[in-house]
Image (spheres, rainbow, N blue to C red):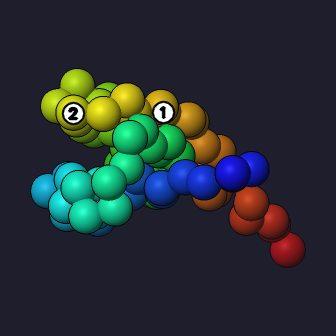
């Protein structure tokens, strides 16, 4: 696999992610944390990692605001 990751957003429900992990038999996952507005996701992703029963690798993302261009 070259690239496979899950976007960890504020709308992601940790119990649902655990269900997907179990259903797919995943042995580890990579979570890409992209802040959306004022809500950071990295702390929530770290909390999820502590409770997960598999290795969880966290990657930081670039805030979406940097892509907005002034006209």
Q: Is residue 11 above or below residue 41?
A: below
Query: Dot 1 lies on which element?
Result: strand
Question: Is disc 2 surrounded by few (<14), some (14 to 19) or many (20+) residues within 10 Å?
Answer: few
Q: Residue at x 38, y 41 (%)?
A: 27
Q: Nearer the viewer, residue 1 or 29?
A: 1
Q: Position of residue 67 (x, y in %)?
A: 74, 60
Residue 17 in view, yes or no: no
Q: For mark 2, give the secondary structure.
A: loop
Q: Which mark is drawn over residue 8?
A: none
Residue shown at the point (57%, 36%) measured from the top left: 60
Please state the horizontal and vertical placement of residue 37, each as a whole percent of the image.
45, 56
Residue pictured at 23% horizontal, 55% vertical:
22
Residue under the point 33% across and 38% down? 45
Give the residue at the far front of this rendering. 25
Furthest toward the right, the residue is 71
Rendered image: mark on residue 58: 1
Q: Is residue 71 left or right of residue 63?
A: right
Q: CA distance from mark 2 to mark 1?
A: 15 Å
Q: Look at mark 2 in the image and give the residue it sits on.
A: 53
Asked whether 48 or 40 is in front, the reply is 48
């Amino acid at each position: 696999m070259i690239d496979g990751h899950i976007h960890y957003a504020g709308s992601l429900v940790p119990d649902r992610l655990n269900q997907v992990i179990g259903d797919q038999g995943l042995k580890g996952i990579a979570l890409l944390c992209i802040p959306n507005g004022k809500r950071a996701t990295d702390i929530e992703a770290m909390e999820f990692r502590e409770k997960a029963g598999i290795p969880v690798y966290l990657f930081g993302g670039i805030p979406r605001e940097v892509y907005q261009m002034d006209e």
